[in-house]
């Protein structure tokens, strides 16, 4: 799995604290730095086993068609692109034009993930998105017309002042478009975001837990009744369209992350590239290390496995836990899980521990109790 981070945005959304900047004048240099990093690290990935590439951000759709072509020519020099099954790019609806979809169509991109967040213009303004609802629908149709057969859209709920009816309406509009994949996240107040500052100043009010849970339940009901498989807490897909890349993260597959603030994982060691685009460009091009590494202890590895796999509908494979972490830790897991199973928050099925619908809403606290 290969992840490429494009840390540039046209403007910052009010809920976001991801690493991205608005100075796009360095984009050409940034692509050269990505090329240098890929060259320096190509031995870290088994090229013949590379099945997914994910270009995320930031806003990768800020790359011009020429920059996108350059990026793919850089990748094509090191990677056998035709063997890669899933190549995703994240896009912002505002960037999707006839010219842009023509560029995507000519590249080996076969999956597009679009940040829609809401079909309600009032809420889109409130969270600082650039696009409006009509633009999102127009962008979706342009991508379809260009032959993109695997489209994912992101939605957000628990927004300040958002009503249940507004949320239902956004879900209905998403279902009407019929994307192959829908991700839906409840708003979290990240420490550096504008919304968090507004919350602290008392200018907005957070959605109540009861409303958040009600919104989540509506989401699950509507999407599953419309034929979407609920395969991860926040992710839904039509049959055959689970995100292969994200499923790899949840299954512990090693990945290489290129770009400023990108993370990599080789199965034991996690690496985080520096979250400063200017230093990243300079250091990578000069061959100076610009990353930190962290080796997971067995305990951290176990906890991370529980946390990520428990989020999926496949749950935690008990035989895998025993094989990777030993009988003692499996016994710990089963002991801690017993009361949740008895109360209907977890179930054991076919050698796996799986969250029930009731358990999903308290999944974080369940996981904490299953940790070592
Ligand atoms: S949400 Fe996406 S588009 Fe908005 S600021 Fe964050 S990275 Fe940029």
Image (spheres, rainbow, N blue to C red):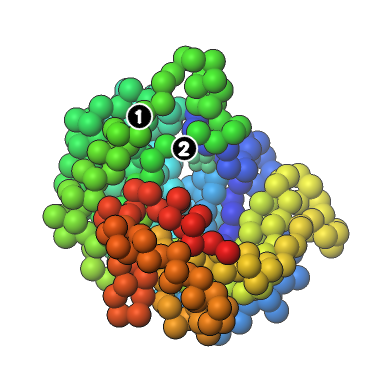
Q: Residue furthest left?
A: 225
Quadrant, the N terminus: bottom right
User: Residue 163, how many percent across, how many down?
Assistant: 25, 27
Does residue 43 show up?
A: yes
Does residue 152 show up?
A: no
> Which of the two labelled residues, at mark 1 and mark 2, occupies the earlier sequence position?
2
- Residue linked to disc 1: 208
Residue found 29% across the figure and 58% down from its top: 343
* Mark 1 vs mark 2, CA separation in Å: 12 Å
Residue found 73% across the figure and 45% down from its top: 276
Q: Is residue 148 above or below residue 240?
A: above
What element does badge 1 sit on? loop
Name the side, left or right, on which 138 lies relative to 303: left
Pointers 1 and 2 in contact (C-beta within 8 Å) = no
Name the side, left or right, on which 332 lies relative to 105: right
Q: Nearer the viewer, residue 339 or 249?
A: 339
- Residue linked to disc 2: 188
User: Residue 75, how many percent across, how many down?
Assistant: 59, 69
Q: Is mark 2 within 8 Å of ligand 1?
A: no
Residue found 41% across the figure and 21% down from its top: 205
């Amino acid at each position: 799995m290969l992840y490429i981070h494009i840390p540039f945005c046209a403007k910052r959304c009010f809920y976001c604290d991801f690493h991205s900047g608005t100075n796009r004048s360095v984009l050409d240099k940034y692509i050269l730095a990505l090329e240098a990093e890929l060259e320096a690290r190509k031995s870290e990935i088994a090229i013949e086993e590379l099945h997914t590439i994910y270009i995320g951000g930031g806003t990768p759709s800020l790359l011009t068609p020429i920059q996108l072509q350059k990026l793919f020519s850089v990748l094509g020099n090191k990677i056998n692109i035709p063997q890669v099954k899933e190549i995703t790019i994240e896009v912002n609806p505002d960037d999707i034009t006839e010219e842009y979809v023509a560029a995507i169509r000519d590249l080996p991109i076969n999956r597009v993930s679009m940040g829609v967040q809401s079909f309600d213009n009032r809420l889109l303004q409130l969270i600082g998105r650039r696009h409006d609802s009509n633009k999102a629908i127009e962008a979706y149709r342009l991508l379809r017309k260009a032959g993109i057969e695997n489209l994912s859209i992101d939605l957000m709920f628990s927004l300040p002042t958002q009503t249940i009816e507004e949320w239902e309406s956004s879900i209905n509009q998403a279902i009407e478009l019929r994307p192959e994949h829908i991700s839906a996240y409840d708003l979290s107040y990240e420490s550096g975001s504008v919304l968090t500052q507004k919350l602290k100043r008392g200018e907005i009010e957070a959605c109540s837990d009861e409303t958040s849970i009600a919104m989540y339940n509506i989401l699950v009901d509507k999407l599953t009744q419309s034929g979407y498989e609920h395969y991860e807490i926040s992710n839904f897909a039509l049959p055959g369209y689970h995100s292969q890349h994200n499923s790899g993260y949840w299954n512990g597959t090693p990945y290489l992350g290129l770009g400023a603030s990108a993370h990599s994982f080789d199965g034991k060691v996690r690496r985080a590239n520096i979250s400063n685009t200017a230093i990243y460009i300079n250091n990578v091009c000069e061959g100076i290390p610009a990353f930190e590494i962290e080796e997971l202890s067995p305990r951290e590895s176990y906890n991370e496995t529980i946390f990520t796999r428990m989020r999926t509908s496949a749950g935690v494979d008990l035989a895998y836990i025993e094989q990777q972490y030993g009988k003692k830790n499996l016994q710990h897991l089963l002991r801690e899980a017993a009361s949740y199973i008895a109360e209907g928050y977890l179930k054991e099925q076919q050698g796996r521990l799986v969250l029930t619908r009731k358990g999903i809403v308290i999944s974080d606290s369940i996981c904490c109790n299953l940790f070592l």
